[in-house]
Amino acid sequence: MATHTVFNQPPALEDMNLYTEDPVLARFVDLEGGTVHDELLRGYGRNIGSSRAYKWGEDANRYSPRLVTHDRFGNRIDQVEFHPAWHALMELSISHRVHALPWLSDDGGFVARAAQMMMMAQVEAGHGCPVSMTAAVVPALRHAPDLAKEWEPRLTSTVYDPRFLPAGDKDGALMGMGMTEKQGGSDVRANTTTAKPEVGGWYRITGHKWFTSAPMSDAFLILAQAPAGLSCFFLPRILDDGTVNEIRIQRLKDKLGNRSNASAELEFDNALAYLVGEEGRGVPTIIEMVNGTRLDCVSGSTGLMRQAVMQAAHHVAHRSAFGSKLIEKPAMQMVIADLEVETQAATALMTRLAGAFDRSDTDEEEAAIKRILTPVAKYWVTKRCSSVVREALECLGGNGYVEESILPRLYRESPLNAIWEGSGNVIALDVIRVLAKQPTAVEALRQGLDRARGHDSHFDRFLDQTWGLIENPADPEAQARRITERLAIAVQAALLLERADSRVADNFVASRVTGDHGAMFGTQPLMAGTEEVARMAVPTT
């Protein structure tokens, strides 16, 4: 029955280029040298922002992966079945080199890839897990030159090949990672999985992993206790002779979010693995992979924030109430402007960190910046994400609570990056470790922040207070989160003062640096330019 006409609803926000129609991202990518990959970024932005890709994201999460332990004859096979939408997303991202760009380019690869990961998370974050691990494993794998020579071409192939075959028979390969166990979690020194040496550098692995995402990967880096201590191993899923390695998928995790991505409990029963690096040096070896995935946690959270704020701004720009558009209401302008400032600050920090990754091999100062900024950014951006997404969801009212709006999926996804690759305390304590043991990193960060002095007296005072806290903490471990938070705000403020629209920078300093902000978004001080900042969040499509 045609009882009414549908009106006062926004048009669907899709079929947009998530790169070219995000001038903030494009500007910060340019400032960090990533526009050498402009054509690739434009192409990925157009494809991942298409209505087709959004539908793939919806379907891949609606129809979760399914564990198939046995074939119809009763043979144990331990395979995971995915919806076709998952495979379509994987093919799209791998064909655009999101899994390998830094290793296929001479410069700007990390910055451009961070932008890609940010765009990916806006549409479907789950398939970013195997993409992230495959990209991040390369530096760690190079500790075993023979393995790297054989596997790096497979891992950087731009062909997605999900077939269950030995890697040598495939057109491309993926990598996973297994660190945590039931009894240890982040305390990997408590791992009980054992590795017994065999001839030729091979070991027999017996034990378990409590969380291993993307168990359909072709190989994994894992930690196990060797005779000389905790060590890093390369564990293939299928051996070169076609024998399936002794890996058992016990079950898939039933997770809050990230439902498109399979996360599994694995058991190893004398599985064959190859030593990577030295015995007893497992954590320093695998941490190179972890640092890469931590950058992706920052990029992914920034993407979730951008999509949520964009959806909210799009809605209020089209929705009318009480005689005018919602975005014309002063209270809504305050909320959207506050969310936009937070998202721009995250984008600035993400691209700056990615730039340090690009330059770290040839610039000692940038290597030091990378070391301290990785945990600072990982801690802060991933934690701010959930608050931003929740407030953006509310801007849509009841519509934001409905699955079709994409906001519920973004919200379920939002806590994950703060947990993955080290939860809050682990990351904050890593910052304290750098401050105590790596003076070159501290000095590099101090010099970088000092270059932003003189823009704003409030920022200068905040910087002095922050260094005072760092140099004379009452209890470094107890104050780890406070110190990390202040460093993150200081770096974001410096970047915005130097690089962003002055209205955004002034808003950030007034609210985050001087502390003139309430407990919720939209409680920053009244400032000129608030409406203009709010409208920056409205997509132009």
Image: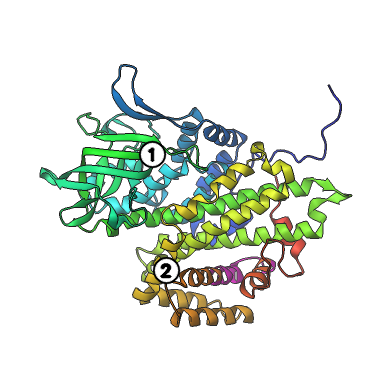
Name the image quarter holding the N terminus. Answer: top right
Where is residue 271 drawn, in percent x and y?
A: 22, 38
- Left or right for 143, reference 116: left
Question: In the figure, residue 422 lies in which quadrant?
Answer: bottom left
Give the magenta range. Answer: 490-503
Q: Is residue 405 visible?
A: yes
Instruction: Identify the image's colour scheme: rainbow, by chain, secondary structure or one colour.
Output: rainbow
Residue 326 located within the stretch drawn in magenta: no
- In the image, what residue type sits under mark 2? Val
- Left or right for 142, reference 485: left
- Disc 2 target residue: 431
Q: Residue at x 67, y 42 (%)?
A: 401
Precedes in sequence: disc 1 or disc 2: 1
Label number found at residue 264: 1
Secondary structure of residue under mark 1: strand
Q: Nearer the viewer, residue 207 or 381?
A: 207
Where is residue 503 drawn, in percent x and y?
A: 70, 67
Q: Is residue 530 above or below residue 473?
A: above
